Image: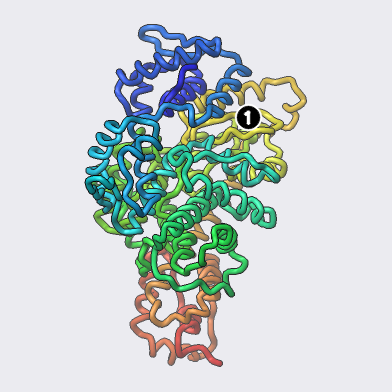
Amino acid sequence: MQQLTKREIDVLLYLLEASEPVTTKELAESHQVSVRTIKYDLTDIREWLSEHKQSLNSQRNRGIWLTVTDSERLKLKSELMEVGRLELFADQQLRFDRLVIQLLLTDQMITASKLAERLGVSKDTIVNDLAALEKRLEKNELQLKRQAGKGFLLTGPERASRLLIEEILQKEFTDYDIYKIMTLLLKKGSSEPYELYAALDTPLQTVFNQAIVQLRHLLAGENLAELNYSELLNLLIRVTIATVRLQNEFTIGSYRLLKRQTLAGALSYQLMEKVFANYHLPLFEAEYDYIYSDAFDPVHQQDILQLTQELIQRVSDLLDYPFEQDPQLLTNLYAHLSLRLSRKQKFVNEYNPFKDEIKQKHAQLFTAIQTASQQIAISPDFICNESFIAYIALHFLVSFEKGTDLRSVRAVYICSTGLGVTSLIKKKVAEELENIEITAFTSVLNATEVIERCDPDLVISIFPVSGIDRPFVKVHPLPTKPDLQKIQQLVKKLLGSDSPQKTHLKVQPKPATKTTLADFSKELILQAYTVYERLQVLLQEQLLTEYREAFLLHVFLMVHRIHFDQQYVMEGNSSEPLLCAHVASVEQIKALFAEYDLVINQSEISALFAYLKGEVKS
């Protein structure tokens, strides 16, 4: 049987999903390799297809394509995704990844012969790979130590070692892998193991599968609608890494034990407790901080609005494009950064289905955002990793994606949900497709419930979801031109169908007033949150910590009152003594509200001071 590399599988899947011929140049660009490399790959692909009684069509000046029925297409896709990973030929990059994993899973010197035996290659190959790998490891703050007669050992900060393992595990995941892992988490009684391609036959794979089993039991009592598959994936990876590193006596911080009283109900704590107990490991506080939050990102107070404005301005300057003139970009990006940088559970490396496509199709924008982020030093480890840069790029892409919104066939979109993600996809669909309405975006975790609730005519998904009882389209994380053509063809088919399903279609566009009201509500909420964040920065030294949640609600209601001319008005001069005691703050608050065209009166300002230290009456 012909064996395929991971890239060759990706190329063949690309061809199976293309609705028109694709040139070798297009394939080379999409997979970031040379045309010559693609031609070598196609030779192997032709042989693999021949063994499956299929052929690859090609024509000069036209391209390459497959002529298969829908059922044959599905069969080939399923077979490709079920190909035993052990049977795949490992290319050099994969060998590098496996080599690093082997070196990071031991605290002892390991010989080239032993590494060659484990990876199934020659000793000379290992020696050559180690020489090339040594230079690459410098940027990761890791050093390769050599000792004659004993072998090799990777040394460096524990933080750097764990980050590198995360990076290797994360980058191998495809949308099919994510769907398979989430399916394993939801499938009761399943004993099917998941193979970590870069960590085959290692403790990492064993612990990862143990973590899946434990998390599956814990999720049985959780509300899936409140969970995010990306965070669940990060949780699995970090519990796995922490377990394996502790088994080799590497810890991320101190040996202080974790206080359990306040954490008993937290999913992250429960998973850590279950897996650590299985391997008889102590529950260290530093390990929980690593598993639950971003232990690599120092906590510090930032003026996120100023940071957002500076980021937009620098990207505008680098690309010579007036992004700074788009107020919606400022609003959405500020909300995104505020939520991401202020929440505790944020991850340095996280699965991002858009990263590779954005880097390839919008390389100039990606590089500009990366450069600007490094210049303003938001947070070196967190903001400047490629996954997070790609999420920021989505907001900038929305500025390019303007168009009318005429929709009719009702669709549910299963994707990586988020403000920037959904906005971009919604704009792209509205601009390039006709007669389609995206009624809901959902994560793969609660897709079944959303589909049942919304009863759509069509399901669009970046994951190969099974068991859907209505028309279904599998697309790339960022819909490609062939994806959009597939969707449009199916929409036309549905609208022209004589089947009973046609009776469910709502072919009238949404009234403009509904969209306007939705936009106004979003703008008001985002503006209120922006004002709250600015006030927190302004009053951070004086604001009572225990009243922060009440202060948030007060600010939201206050902005609403100002918008609808219903501000507080106190009788007499009862607020004057309080205002006189905070003259400087009064002027700063007035100036802050003026930036958002909000005119705040003295009574409202006085009410704000009720949340400051020394002003609360017992």
255 or 212, nearer to the observer: 255
Rendered location of residue 201, percent (x, y): 48, 40
Rendered location of residue 587, percent (x, y): 35, 78
Query: What residue sits 39% from the left and 46% below the top?
Result: 167
**Above or below for 612 versus 512:** below
Residue located beneath label 1 in the image: 472
Q: Splitting the image into 4 quarters, where does residue 438 fall?
A: top right
Q: By what rule are the colours in the image chosen? A: rainbow
**Above or below for 74 versus 511:** above
Say which element carries label 1. strand
Total number of numbered discs in the rendering: 1
Q: Residues within 10 Å of mark 1 (few under 14, many from 20)?
A: some
Residue projecting furthest to the right:
500
The amino acid type of the residue labelled 1 equals Phe
Q: Is residue 421 left or right of residue 129?
A: right
170 or 526, nearer to the observer: 170
**Above or below for 351 versus 594:** above
- Is the C terminus in the top left, top right, bottom left or bottom right quadrant? bottom right
Query: What residue sits 49% from the left and 24% below the top?
Result: 13
Q: Splitting the image into 4 quarters, where does residue 221 fall?
A: bottom right
Query: What residue sits 53% from the left and 31% below the top?
Result: 475
Q: Is residue 413 left or right of residue 21?
A: right
Q: Is residue 501 left or right of residue 463?
A: right
Rendered location of residue 102, percent (x, y): 38, 44
Rendered location of residue 504, percent (x, y): 73, 32
557 or 349, nearer to the observer: 349
Q: Splitting the image into 4 quarters, where does residue 410 fall?
A: top right
**Residue 565 in view (yes/no):** no
113 or 37, nearer to the observer: 113
Residue projecting furthest to the top:
59
**Residue 210 in view (yes/no):** yes
